[in-house]
Every structure is written in C-alpha cells, then in structure tokens.
Image (tube, rainbow, N blue to C red):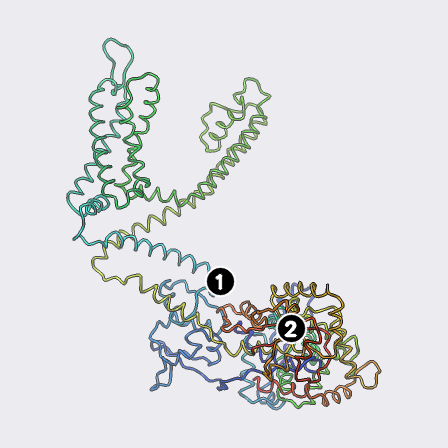
Amino acid sequence: MAAGVAAWLPFARAAAIGWMPVASTPMPMPPQDKRKAQDGLIILNVSGTKFQTWRTTLERYPDTLLGSTERDFFFHEETNEYFFDRDPDIFRHILNFYRTGKLHYPRQECISAYDEELAFFGIIPEIIGDCCYEEYKDRRRENAERLQDDEEMDMNNDVTPVNLTFREYLWRAFENPHTSTLALVFYYVTGFFIAISVMANVVETVPCGSLPNRSKEISCGDRYALAFFCLDTACVMIFTVEYLLRLIAAPSRYKFMKSVMSVIDVVAIMPYYIGLVMTDNDQVSGAFVTLRVFRVFRIFKFSRHSAGLRILGYTLKSCASELGFLLFSLTMAIIIFATVMFYAEKGSTASKFTSIPAAFWYTIVTMTTLGYGDMVPKTIVGKVFGSICSLSGVLVIALPVPVIVSNFSRIYHQSQRAEKRRAQRVLAPRLPPSFATASKEAGQALVGKAPSPPFESQHHHLLHCLEKTTNHEFVDEQTFQANCMEVSVMNKSGSRTSSVSSSPHGLGSCCSRRHRKKSSFSLPSTNNQELSTIQIRERPVANSRASLNAKLDETVPLKCDEPYITPSMVSLSAPVVTSSDGDGSTTTAYSQSNIVRVSAL
Amino acid sequence: NHALMGSYENSSDSDLELSTVRHQPEGLDQLQAQTKFTRKELQSLYRGFKNECPSGLVDEETFKSIYSQFFPQGDATTYAHFLFNAFDMDRNGSIRFEDFVIGLSVLLRGSVTEKLNWAFNLYDINKDGYITKEEMLAIMKSIYDMMGRYTYPCVRDEAPSEHVDKFFQKMDRNRDGVVTIEEFIETCQKDENIMNSMQLFENVI
C-alpha cells in the first residue's frame, strides 16, 4: 500500500462503524495486533552520518531490510543505534524512499554503486519514480553494454597460452595478431597484399598509351596483361591460403563460414577461380567481366586491420531502423514528387519527363540537392513543385542523420574505453562480474519473501466487514463469470430452486456458524447428481484481495502463501441438506444463497 | 488560525488557490482537551494527516480518492461523500485536522451512545433529525456500490431496497416511515450483534 494512504487505514477502519447498524451478518474478529510497540525514534548510523526517523516510517515497507527484523542484525548495543557500513550519500535517497514513498535516482551517482546499495537494503529498482526512471534506465543500459564488452574481452583473453592445441593456437594467432611475431608478420603481409591487389585493380583500367598499330589507347591491364595476371594470381593464392588456414583453425567451422568476413573473403577470390575455369568463351566472357567487379570487395578485407571500419559497420547495423526509416520516407517522397512533376510537365513540349520512372531521377537528384541539370522543369507549375521538392529533400535527409551520428559516437567511445581498459587490466586486480550479479540476486531474494504485514491483515479485515455488512463476497472476475454461468444453469431447473429459496432453513448462514463450531460434516452420498459441481477453488476472498493488494502495493508483490480451500457444494435438493444440517439451529431466512460451504478457515 | 479563502471565479483557478491555503490546527493541549486521545496518539495522527495533506485541509476530492484506495473493487465515491459530510462538522467543504480528530475520537474512544449518534448523523443526510427511506436507500446503494461488480452472489438491483426495508422493519417502531434518533438508539441497544460490533475497533490506533 502506498505509504501515505496506509496512514489513513485506521481512519477507514474507524469509519466502518457506520456500517454496523445496517449489517446483515455479524462482523468478523479483528486481527490481533501483535506488536503494540510505541512509536519511537530510530537512529541509523551510516558510516558515521547519523540519520533518525520514526520506527513506523521504516516499517511501512516490511519486505526491505530496514523495515523488517533483519535490521536487528545491525544493531549496535554499545551506542544503542543501528550501524551500517555503507555509503551515506546514497543512503539519504533510500531513507527518503521510506519517508515519501518515492525512490529517486541521483544523477551524479554511479549506477552500479547505486544498484548495489539498493540490493543491500532490499529495495527493487523498479519502483524508482517516474521523474528519475528514464535516466536510470539509460544509465543502466550503457552500463550493461560496457559489462558485455568486458565479458567479451575476458573470453578472448582468458585462455592461457599454454596447453593450446595447434588449431587453437592458429585461431588465436589469426584473431589477435599481437600474440606472436609470426602472427604479426602474417597480418602485415596480408594487409600489404590486399593493398597491392586493390591498387592493381585500379591501375589496370588506366589508359597506358597506344600500341603502334592502333590509334586507340588501351588500358594498362590489356598492355601488360601477363604482369597483371601474375600479380593477381599471387594475391589470390595468398588469400586462398589465408582463408583455408582460417577455416581449419576456426573452432566452429559452420559459424565461421556464416560470418561476414568469411563471405567477403570468398567473394574476393571467387572471380579469379571462375575466370580460370571458364575459357575464352564469348558468351560468358561478358559475365566474366562483370564478375571482376567483385574483386573490389577485397577492400573490405581491410576491416580486419582497421577497428574504425568495423565500428562503422557495427554502427550501420545498429542504426538499421533509422536507416530503414530514412529509406522509406525518401522512397515515399520520391514517388510523390515524381508523380507530381510528371503530370506538371506533361503539357510542355520536348519535356524530358517522359514517364514517372524517368521523373524519379530528377526527384532524387533534386532532393539530395545535387542538381545535375540534365532534367529541368519548364512549366511554372513544374518549377513550383520542383522548389518544394528540393526544400523537403533537405528536411527528410536531415532527420535521421543525427541519430546515426550519435550512435556512431557512442560506439566509438566505447571501443576507445575498451582499448584503454585492456591496457589497464594488466595493472589492477579486477572484481569478476559474478560479484555484482550475486549481490543482485541476494537483493532479489530479500524482496521476494513476503510475510503478511499488519496493514494487509487490517485491510483484509476492513473488507471482510464490508462483505458481512452486505452479505456478499468479493470474488475475482473468473469466479464471477463461472458463478453467473452456474446461476443460469441452476435457474433452468426452475421448481427445485424455488423450493430451496423458500426453505425456512437458511443455508447461507450455515458457514458463518459452522466454521466456528468445526463440526464434522458428512457429505450425503446418495444424491450424487446434485453434487454436480464440487468446486475446489482458492478462497476467492484471499485471491481477490491478493490482486487488490497487488494494485495498491507498488513495491512488493504479495504472495498468499496458503490458498484457502473451500470445497463448495451446489445442492439442489432441500431435504438432503436439511438432514445433514444436523445441529438444527434456528437460522434466519436468507433468500439469497443456496450454497453450503465448509471453509477451512 | 484559519487562512481565509478568497472566492474563486472559475474552477481552473481553484486548484491553484486551494494549494496556497493553509490551515494550522489548534494547539496540542486544546485538542487533548477536546478528544480522548493521548498526546502521543495525537502527534502520530497529525504526522500521518500532514503527510498526506500538507496544506492541513482535506477537500472532498482528496478525501474521495484516499478512501477509494481502500476499496479498489468497487466505487467508494458516493459513500465517501456521505462520510465527508459526517466529518465536516461546520460544513465548509473541507475537513480540518480538528474535525478529523474529533470524529475519530468519537469513533474509537467514545461511548456506545456517542458512536450510535455518529452513525445516525451519517445516515441522516440532510441532518434534520429523521432518517427517511430515501436517505437510507441512498446510503445503502453507496455501500453496495463499494462491493463492485464481482461479488458472490451477484448483487441484484433490488438488494439495496430490500436491505432498507429490513432496516426499517427493525428500527421504525411506530411505523411512521421515518426513524428518529431515539428509535435508532433504542433498537440498536437491544441488538446484540450491533452492540458487539461497536467494540470492534477499539484498538485501531
């Protein structure tokens, strides 16, 4: 229950006296209030800073450390105070939570320190107030990413250099070239050959002077065909060897073959082999020439050598949704404007806007503010819409770009930190992340146990009094639906129910007397057909009240430990029941319920 | 020292103005004289009261929202309205701490006759000294409203009026259609259940 409202429970209970004169049934007994301790001041000494508060303030949340008897473990007899060896600055916020019912997150505090304090005092972070919740969630997410980076680094560096098989050694050499000199040499050699290969691809298309018997200039690639071929062969051989070695060394070959770098490797060397296999067949040589384009993908092999390139790729991957949005909105705008321009320019003579797809080119060039000028509108309407198009293009492109930029910056800084930490880790001892998670689990366990606090039992009693006043019971929705269906079923057998309702022996009141007497109730075995529904259901009151408390209680999920089993018997035959109604006590006629309940209260 | 409230023209201003009104209760000694609570009990009550209503006054909306939180399944606003009128003794639209504490003192520490008087005052909506059937029906409906929809057995529409009829049958001695305070107290004192239930909340504080 919210802290403030709980203070008004005594008032609500006192006001229940207003129901007493109109009550249909006698009232239940109030719960025993075990602790009648006087409200006193408690001194909390947190690392020397003394805090004081009322005992009842702390006991508002009995599932936390300070609100339960767990604080007795920290009681210091010599000074008659409770001593906690924790951070007093953060404790201030925790104590304010008890006072006001709202937990705030201070911006200047470290998120993991704050989380540890919360876990220690048994407070779940989900109750942080709305004012601070977003900030808290953001910081938590950043921290989690950082921890994840840490773990990945751990996994990479945890394997000790000794006792590695050759395969593992090879894999480690490929992934971390700094581990051994041979790996470093291999790293630089492959890098060099990637550069050579890319440059060769570029240079072989440069015109290189003309042959003596031709006027046309031919490219260097055609002039020095053999040299370029040898160079290409050498590069491809190195790449192939590298790829095969990686494939052998990979711990999971299937996973390796699925990875992006492996695909790039394959795409880089495939054209060469396909070219070897295919002869100088004219039909396929056109396709072969196209394949050569794929050789440019070798440049992506540099991403193994450059962290920045990897980060860029990772950024683009993580901004996939923003990029998708950009693409989608651009496409929409392009289609709209192309259509408009086409119909606007349809009238003008010799218009370049021959069709809507032709207008696409104009729209794209205008929206990205390129403006080649190969297609320009000539009509006035066309010019008006053309200017609108260029203005909107700027806006549409400018929107998702900051998001992508900020993502890139965040990821880049994270990788910088990772690099720095890798250097520092050699020096400082590190607490394994298991400690943090262990304390968190301990915190969860603390909060998880749910004794029944006095407020809840008093609130139950209040609701019970209301039930007795009106002679109806609270049930939850499912039971309500079930009962309504039962009632409709029972009403179908018309005469029998009417005979029951006019029976002088009130069946509904039996339970209130009966469970006090705890007499043994023998089920009549003869009328089995009447015992059509023997409902074992959790005591609906407890159930519904549990859900009531769940609504009121923001902090702790209340668990009803023992479900109260009420076997209830729907009996349609009056005589049978009255014979079992053995005590023969006079009961006032209640025309409403015809349920006999034996409740295990 | 009751701060004077200016009259507010439109309701949008009224929220702002109500927050600037503050009320300080009478001294602790005076309250101790007027009620049957001890000093410590009064202190504890005031702390709880002030925590929830820092301005020192409870207006009807706040009162309804607080009371409704105890009855999440039903609609407690109508009954809260009647309760509010029962506590707001000088009928000025807000409950001060004195009203609150005096009411509680009657309910928790008063004699049975005082409690019955309080209950009669609650039922007598127009405070004319008579409980009519219409008044009782309104009260009964509001009590049944607090039960909500999901009850067992289902609350039928005639249930409140049947309950009122039973009440009048019991209370209205001279069959004149109204219940006076004397009839009420006399009947209640004869009913064992009611007398027992009056003692139920003695040790709530």
CB atoms of marks 1 and 2 within 8 Å: no
Amino acid type assigned to the residue bearing label 2 in the image: Thr
Task: Measuring from the top left, give residue A264's x and y in whole percent.
Answer: 31, 36
Q: Position of A474 compared to A154: left or right?
A: right
Q: Is residue A468 placed above or below A173 in the rendered structure?
A: below
**Which residue is depicted at the point 60% across and 77% down?**
A598
**Which residue is depicted at the point 20% across and 22% down?**
A227
Question: Same chain, marks 1 and 2?
Answer: yes
Secondary-structure class at tag 2: loop
State the quadrant of the C terminus of chain A.
Answer: bottom right
Whether residue A93 appears in this view of the structure is: no
Q: Which residue is mark 1?
A: A131
Q: Along the line of sight, which residue is nearer the eye, A23 or B179?
A: A23
Q: Which residue is mark 2?
A: A526
Whether residue A79 appears in this view of the structure is: yes
Task: Measuring from the top left, give residue A239's x and y in whole percent.
Answer: 23, 34
Lower position in the chain sequence, tag 1 or tag 2: 1
Q: Nearer the viewer, mark 1 or mark 2?
A: 2
Instruction: Give the CA separation, mark 1 to mark 2.
Output: 65 Å
Q: Along the line of sight, which residue is nearer the eye, A537 or A223?
A: A537
- Report the residue that reaches farthest toward the left: A181
Q: Chain of mark 2?
A: A
Q: Chain of mark 1?
A: A
Please tell me in which quadrant of the rendered image residue A266 appears.
top left
Task: Measuring from the top left, give residue A1's x and y in whole percent.
Answer: 53, 72
- For disc 2, the neighbor class at 10 Å (few under 14, some 14 to 19, many from 20) is few
Q: Position of A119 compared to B199: left or right?
A: left
Please tell me in which quadrant of the rendered image residue B37 appears.
bottom right
Q: Is residue B35 placed above or below A145 in the rendered structure?
A: below
Q: Along the line of sight, which residue is nearer the eye, A120 or B35?
A: A120
Amino acid type assigned to the residue bearing label 1 in the image: Cys
Secondary-structure class at tag 1: helix
